[in-house]
Image (spheres, rainbow, N blue to C red):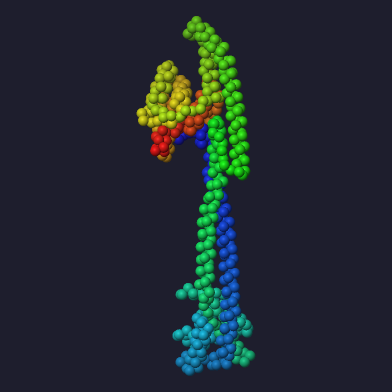
Amino acid sequence: MNGAVAAGGPASIPIRRQGGLTRRLVFSFVTLTLLGLGGSGWVLYRQALNSLEEQLAAHLVAEAELVAASLGSGYVTHLRPGMDHMLLHKGLQARLRGTREALGARRIYVFDRNGRSLVDTEEGTRIGREVHLLRFHNRQVEAIWRGELAHTKRFTDEDTGAHYMTGYAPIYAGNEIVAGVGVDIGAGYMDSIVGFKRSIYLLAGLGTLLTLFVGVGVARHITRPVQRLVTAAREIGRGNLEHEIRVEATDEIGYLAETMEEMRNKLVARDAQLRQMLGGVAHEIRNPLSGIEIYAGLIADELPDGDPRKVHIQKVRTLNHVISEFLDFARPSSPQPESVLLHRVVEDAAFVLLPEMEAAGVIFQGQVPPDIRVFADAEQVKRAIINLMKNGVQAMRDGGTLTVGARHAGDTGGYVAIEVADTGPGVPDEMRRRLFEPFFTTREQGSGLGLAIVQKTAETNNGHVEVESETGRGTTFRVILPAMQALTAVAE
């Protein structure tokens, strides 16, 4: 909507997102748990894995050295391509297969300096065929040609997904390195390690869920009294000083609640003093003012109709109305909420203002459905509607149309929007945000308290006021109040 401004209630101040403290507390708890459980679990997992890999590597290198020693007679150097079916090759292959079974290895293979196979426990591997695995173990292969023992890091078989490590050792013929042997042994401990890793993840997940529940509980324990204090502070800001601030807490929040209750009691005492003072001032002013009004009326009756002095006398006669508005704003009575049938209230207000509307050439249109009710103080709602209608009539100096309607508002229809729209010149942007300020007026005879009283009335009845205006197209005031229908449904 163009030029819409809300006054009073939640719409008049910046709305802060609720639950921010709860989310931060829960996030902190969960983060600390994940860092604690997850971090320590990951450290234990890595330590266990490294320890087992070191043990397997030492065992593997020793076995590779043992196999190399058993082949150190130099017979492997006599093997040539095409000798796969000769007794020498078959005998060496049978010996390696027996060693493989004894060690529980996956594969044992012997190769020359060119990376060509000499003997292999795998079926179908011919003499002179390239051992492709050596391409990935260049550093280990170079080490055995220098007479060193070597082993690879743990790797995964792409076909089976099993984990393996390979140990390498040189084969000597005398003092000469004539070949190398590789022994692949499965890392059987990986099943246990993977299970351990899953246990860590499960523990971290359960810890996170537990921390989440604990964090939500702690956060609610902290934020609930804070929310009560926020609600109490808003009520005090609205001028509602009747409700006692009570928060059952013995910590800093409880101390804050006690301080706010002490502040409320002092405000109540000062408010009572102010009301007493205002009553005395009003009494002292109204007594002589009544006599002044009588004499002003007599003087006005004796003056001719076109006499400009009548205007000044009329200002004197409106002083009593100004004082009444001032007292209504300064010491409003506590609302007595009840079921209010809106169309009757609007009819009564229109009847009161009928002479003013006829004098100004304003056409009244009542569009309030007969079944809409609000839960509010009937007399206060009536005064608020009269103020808004009078404001609309005064805005249309050259005549126009004043429309009063009502409709259910909110996602669940729990509120009623009472709309008072005029076809006047509208309100400029620079003035719109000041409409509800006390004593702000653009009229010579206005007190500047009418709209401020409307706002206070809406607030004390658990509602708020909105205004929508566009220059040249009129102004719409919208009073939002609780619907009686929603309150009845909740009670049932």
Depth check: give the residue in front, 271 or 68: 271
Tell me: residue 155, above or below residue 217: below
The N terminus: image quadrant:
top left
Residue at the outermost top position: 302
Residue found at x 57% / y 80%: 60
Q: How many marks?
A: 0
Relative to the observer, which residue lies in front, 254 or 435? 254
Q: Is residue 356 left or right of residue 313?
A: left
The quarter of the displayed image where residue 135 is located:
bottom right
Residue 381's spot in the image, x, y percent? 45, 26
238 left or right of 351 in image: right
| Side of 409 where 35 appears, left or right | right
Q: Nearer the viewer, residue 452 or 394?
A: 452
Where is residue 82 drawn, in percent x and y?
Answer: 47, 91
At x 59% / y 66%, what residue is drawn?
A: 43
The image position of residue 347, as x and y in percent, is 39, 23
User: Is residue 61 something one can see in this rendering?
Assistant: yes
- Residue 37 image position (x, y, % from top left): 57, 61
> Can residue 388 be seen?
no
60 in relation to 354, above or below: below
The quadrant in which the C terminus is found is top left
The residue shown at (48%, 33%) is 462
Q: Residue at x 42, y 33 (%)?
A: 483
